[in-house]
Amino acid sequence: MPTVNVASGDITAIAADAIVVNLFEVVTSPAGGTGAVDRALDGAISSLIADGDIKGKSGEITLIHAFGKLPAKRVIVAGLGKQSSFGLDEVRSLSGNVARYLRRHGIRRAATLAHGAGIGGLDTEAAAQAIAEGTMLGHYAFRKYRSSANGDQPEKELDELTIVEHDPAKLDALRSGVATGALLADCAILVRDMVNEPANVMNPAKMAEIAANVAREVGLDITVLGREEMMTHGMGALLAVAQGSANEPRLIVLEHHGDPSDPSNNIAIVGKGVTFDTGGVSLKQAAGMWEMKSDMGGGASVIGAMRAIGRLKPKINVFGVIPAVENMPSGTAQRPGDIVRAMSGKTIEVDNTDAEGRLILADAISYIKQAKKANRVVDIATLTGAIIVALGHVTTGVMGRSQPLIDAVLAASKATGEKMWQLPLHDEYKEQNRSDWADVKNTGGRPAGSITAALFIGEFTDGVEWAHLDIAGTAMSEKERGWIAKGATGVPMRTLVRLVRDLSKS
């Protein structure tokens, strides 16, 4: 994984395998650091612009050999796109694309201009944070189980990227931004590694082990409940999901006491941790079922967020809650038509055993409300295929009963570039969850499936502000783009951290 540093100096004087400069679309005469490099190259960049070989479009990357005219061996010209639409998202994506490009070309040491912090007009610290996040997240690849035995040649890694700034007054802001961005990227990489692990490795016990390691590392309190404790608390919904698997369930609670003088200043982030979801007796189709190792993405994002929170130490009490189970078909598995009693006392008709995530979240939310007096709850879950139909693989769905909390989530997502959109929870949709045999049914059918799933969870959130994030479409990616790598994305860990920090300030 590359380290990102900051140095004072002139980009044209840096000895590196490559230096990275930038260019807005439609610019015909490079300015600033790019202009200085162009002059050192005897106008090579200007000539390529004039010939139409460099257009400055977003995603465009051009390599120029310096041929001894600079201490650096190569110059990378990265397109910034239109200046009118340029922002931190573009910096993050550009940095991810450049990191992969440098790796493909075997470049180990590179230096770069601070994209956006000069001519782009962005806040210096925020731009540096986006560069660090984009570089580390874009460079990421999960290769733990690949070896030379299959003929693969290991790619050279980008070891170091240095942001070079000629204005000494900006150095402190750049260093602060890089430190924050590197921390958040490192925690998001923990999330990605957990989600990318196969389910024969990442089971409930393994999730609890990783959470315990995080707690020790950053000074969090941790409680892990097993089956017996869950039975004592009456967690019939969670236990019903787990009863078909040989892997024992865990309820993991991480605690950051950022404001011990005010226990009411708190928030719980509750992440679904189904380490593999076959659908249970309501078995999923075989095609694509391997992706269900990612059904613990919400729980992993909570563990990663709590690691960052433990480092950043915001003045707010935070509970990270992960109900971790495996949903398997067996002779002991729950059946469609079963009726279970949740910790809250409500009875649930199990209409479909593949609607299991909402069952474990129901008991986890009830527990954190009762045991820790949480008054704000955000749950995160790879919950429904319906959200993919509605929003694809770009945007996370947000729902809930507390508009101020939802607004805070959306503001945090905008700041981090993890795109989100609010869906309605009109009372009319509740009809679909009504049961003839119990207090509520665990699925409302195909229409508005994401909304009815959220409304089911909402049945267990009385007395708290509540927001729900459905990340079924955004937890995994089939291809690389910008700061997103193939496989697990780490969404929405950075948004959760930003939300907690924003709430601590308000």
Image (spheres, helix red, strand yellow):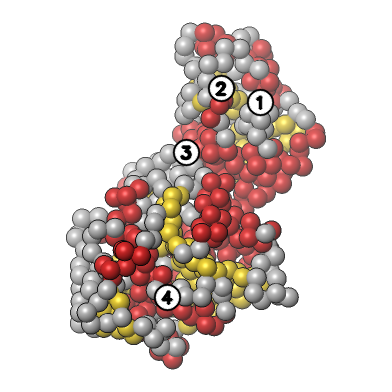
Q: Pointer 4: what residue?
A: 460
Mark 1 against mark 3, which lies toward the viewer?
1
Q: Amino acid at mark 4?
A: Phe
Q: Residues under labels 4 and 2: Cα distance?
A: 50 Å
Image quadrant holding the C terminus, namely: bottom right
Q: Earlier in the sequence, mark 3 or mark 2?
A: 2
Q: Is residue 472 left or right of residue 468?
A: left
Q: Residues under labels 3 and 4: Cα distance?
A: 38 Å
Q: Mark number for residue 482?
A: 3
Q: Is residue 366 left or right of residue 275?
A: right
Residue 37 shows in this picture: no
Q: Residue furthest right?
A: 169
Q: Earlier in the sequence, mark 3 or mark 4?
A: 4
Q: Earlier in the sequence, mark 1 or mark 4?
A: 1
Q: Earlier in the sequence, mark 4 or mark 2?
A: 2
Q: Pointer 1: what residue?
A: 119
Q: Amino acid at mark 2?
A: Phe
Q: Amino acid at mark 1?
A: Ile
Q: Is residue 274 left or right of residue 407?
A: left
Mark 3 against mark 4, which lies toward the viewer?
4
Numbered disc 4: secondary structure: loop
Q: Earlier in the sequence, mark 1 or mark 3?
A: 1
Q: Residue furthest front?
A: 428
**Is 302 located above or below residue 64 in the figure?**
below
Q: Residue furthest bottom?
A: 232
Q: Residues under labels 1 and 2: Cα distance?
A: 9 Å
Q: Pointer 2: what residue?
A: 24
